[in-house]
């Protein structure tokens, strides 16, 4: 009798918190049904031979931007395809009201059903949402969004707080489509309510506020200085115009506010030594508070000293080689808990203009394993187990999906990336399955490429080709424990 729908046979299984073990994995339906030294072939309807390969839990890319620069549904389909080819089986994407995305403002009671409708049948991988809030009405909806919509993370952009004021930014006239301030007073009210709702649902998980920590007043002043005396290196100029110490300042502001509102905080995309040290400082200063320190693939692999052009403009900026090495030190010592892509698909056309007017960001989700394995494992001795924790188990834990996601255990979703950690090739745009028409890493040699991606027991990427369909992805209600119990 065939008791398994799929067996992954002969691979080196990378188990978060345990290590690398030679084992077979039996999958029944969408779940892991068995992990054993030997599962006979005849017990399976289908067998995948993983000999010589490493079987990682599917990555949970917990910082993503779907629909920011392109039509939402088109972006969801193409960029979740890029995620699938990179061994990413879950994406948690940031969404906000205002310009771009759906180009609408209003309460989430109106906006969220529209978002769900556009998401259905659009994603190749499982997905969830973090929501940015900009009005008092939005703040009043937080408890409803957690309880009814399965959203457990919210977002505040510190450098947006001047965008809705007349004359503050030539490209940002009413960018957020609001007329109320979103200054630190607004952030205080936002954090206070997140803290209250977190206390309400603390038995099920953490309700948290993700914060983009940059100080807009310092950025404005530094921009003026750099424009008068450019260095000739555009990405160094951009880094100097948003200097690391303004990240440090913003993180310390957030730390004080978190302590006084009892609000769990995710400190996003830390780009520099000063930012990481500020994060470490607030963690040490306020040990009763919950802080997550997050790193990104591009801040761990690129610097302004590499001769890249303005196409690699991103917020926060790429920093020095010294900062890159310090970020890796922070990964190795465990200070940075999650590594994400901050994927935002953009085209060369939207990058037109000069350094100051071209749009920021770029995609990178397909490079999750190649960068972590090349730069982490091969170059710096980061263990494969820790890679599985950084890109799968920890994001699932911090974002209320564990052990449904990010785990290699019986009963968890059968999400896997089968990776050849010795396979080296150059980054080629056509193999990243993205709608983006450039990539800052293009031409770089990376070692450690996914060969097969499995989502809830279904093969969705194999031998360089997407074999899944838009609509394979399901919406994830968070906290998982709360909504599983309700279901």
Image: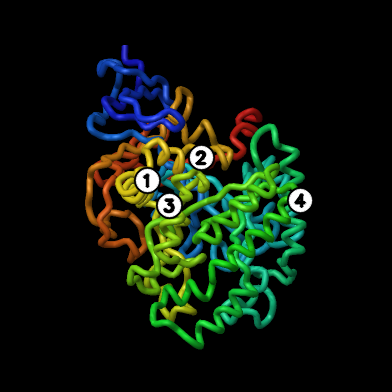
200 on left or right of 47: right
**Viewport quadrant of the C terminus:** top right
Task: Write the residue at 35% across / 70% down.
Answer: 308
- Disc 4 versus disc 1: nearer the observer: 4
| Among the two numbered marks 3 and 4 on one chain, the one whose residue lies closer to the N terminus | 4
Task: Write the residue at 36% across / 73% down.
Answer: 309
Viewer-side residue, 18 vs 367: 18
**Viewport quadrant of the N terminus:** top left
Secondary structure category for the residue under label 3: helix
CA separation in Å, label 3 and label 4? 31 Å
| Among the two numbered marks 3 and 2 on one chain, the one whose residue lies closer to the N terminus | 3
Secondary structure category for the residue under label 4: helix
CA separation in Å, label 4 and label 2? 25 Å
Q: Which residue is mark 3?
A: 328
Instruction: State if disc 1 and disc 2 touch (CB < 8 Å).
Output: no
483 on left or right of 4: right
Mark number displayed over residue 261: 4
Instruction: State if disc 1 and disc 4 touch (CB < 8 Å).
Output: no
| Among the two numbered marks 4 and 1 on one chain, the one whose residue lies closer to the N terminus | 1
Decide if residue 367 is in sight here.
Answer: yes
Secondary structure category for the residue under label 2: helix
Question: Pointer 4: residues within 10 angstroms few (<14), some, or many (20+)?
Answer: some
Tell me if residue 240 comes above or below residue 27 in the rendering: below
Q: Which residue is mark 2?
A: 394
Q: Kindly indicate the quadrant of the structure image that contains residue 99.
A: bottom right
| Among the two numbered marks 1 and 3 on one chain, the one whose residue lies closer to the N terminus | 1
| Among the two numbered marks 2 and 1 on one chain, the one whose residue lies closer to the N terminus | 1
CA separation in Å, label 1 and label 3? 25 Å
Viewer-side residue, 315 vs 98: 315
């Amino acid at each position: 009798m065939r008791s398994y729908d799929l067996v992954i046979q002969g691979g080196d299984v990378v188990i978060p918190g345990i290590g690398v073990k030679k084992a077979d994995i039996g999958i029944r339906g969408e779940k892991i049904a068995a992990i054993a030294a030997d599962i006979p072939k005849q017990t399976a309807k289908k067998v995948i031979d993983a000999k010589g390969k490493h079987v990682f839990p599917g990555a949970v890319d917990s910082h993503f931007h779907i629909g920011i620069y392109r039509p939402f549904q088109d972006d969801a389909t193409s960029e979740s395809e890029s995620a699938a080819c990179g061994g990413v089986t879950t994406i948690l994407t940031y969404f906000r009201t205002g310009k771009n995305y759906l180009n609408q403002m209003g309460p989430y009671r109106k906006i969220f059903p529209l978002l769900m409708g556009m998401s259905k049948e659009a994603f190749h991988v499982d997905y969830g949402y973090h929501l940015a809030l900009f009005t008092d009405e939005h703040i009043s909806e937080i408890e409803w969004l957690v309880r009814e919509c399965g959203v457990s993370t919210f977002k505040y952009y510190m450098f947006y707080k001047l965008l809705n004021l007349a004359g503050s930014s030539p490209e940002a006239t009413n960018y957020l489509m609001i007329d109320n301030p979103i200054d630190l007073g607004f952030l205080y009210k936002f954090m206070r309510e997140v803290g209250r709702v977190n206390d309400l649902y603390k038995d099920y998980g953490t309700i948290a506020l993700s914060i983009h920590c940059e100080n807009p007043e310092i950025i404005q002043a530094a921009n003026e200085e750099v424009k008068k005396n450019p260095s000739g290196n555009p990405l160094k100029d951009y880094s100097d115009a948003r200097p690391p110490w303004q990240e440090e300042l913003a993180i310390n502001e957030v730390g004080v506010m978190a302590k006084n509102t009892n609000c769990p905080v995710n400190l996003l995309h830390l780009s520099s030594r000063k930012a990481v040290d500020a994060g470490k400082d607030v963690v040490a200063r306020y040990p009763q508070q919950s802080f997550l320190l997050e790193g990104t693939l591009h801040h761990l692999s690129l610097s302004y000293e590499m001769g890249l052009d303005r196409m690699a403009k991103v917020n926060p900026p790429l920093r020095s080689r010294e900062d890159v090495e310090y970020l890796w030190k922070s990964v190795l010592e465990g200070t940075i808990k999650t590594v994400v892509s901050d994927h935002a698909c953009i085209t060369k056309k939207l990058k037109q203009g000069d350094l100051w007017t071209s749009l920021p960001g770029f995609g990178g989700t397909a490079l999750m394993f190649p960068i972590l394995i090349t730069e982490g494992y091969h170059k710096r001795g980061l263990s494969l187990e820790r890679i599985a924790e950084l890109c799968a188990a920890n994001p699932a834990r911090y974002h209320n999906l564990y052990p449904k996601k990010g785990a290699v255990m019986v009963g968890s979703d059968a999400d896997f990336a089968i990776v050849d950690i010795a396979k080296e090739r150059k980054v080629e745009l056509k193999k990243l399955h993205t709608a983006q028409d450039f990539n800052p890493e293009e031409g770089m040699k990376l070692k450690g490429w996914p060969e097969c991606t499995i989502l809830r027991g279904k093969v969705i990427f194999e031998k360089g080709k997407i074999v899944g369909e838009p609509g394979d992805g399901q919406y994830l209600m968070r906290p998982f424990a709360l909504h599983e119990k309700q279901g």
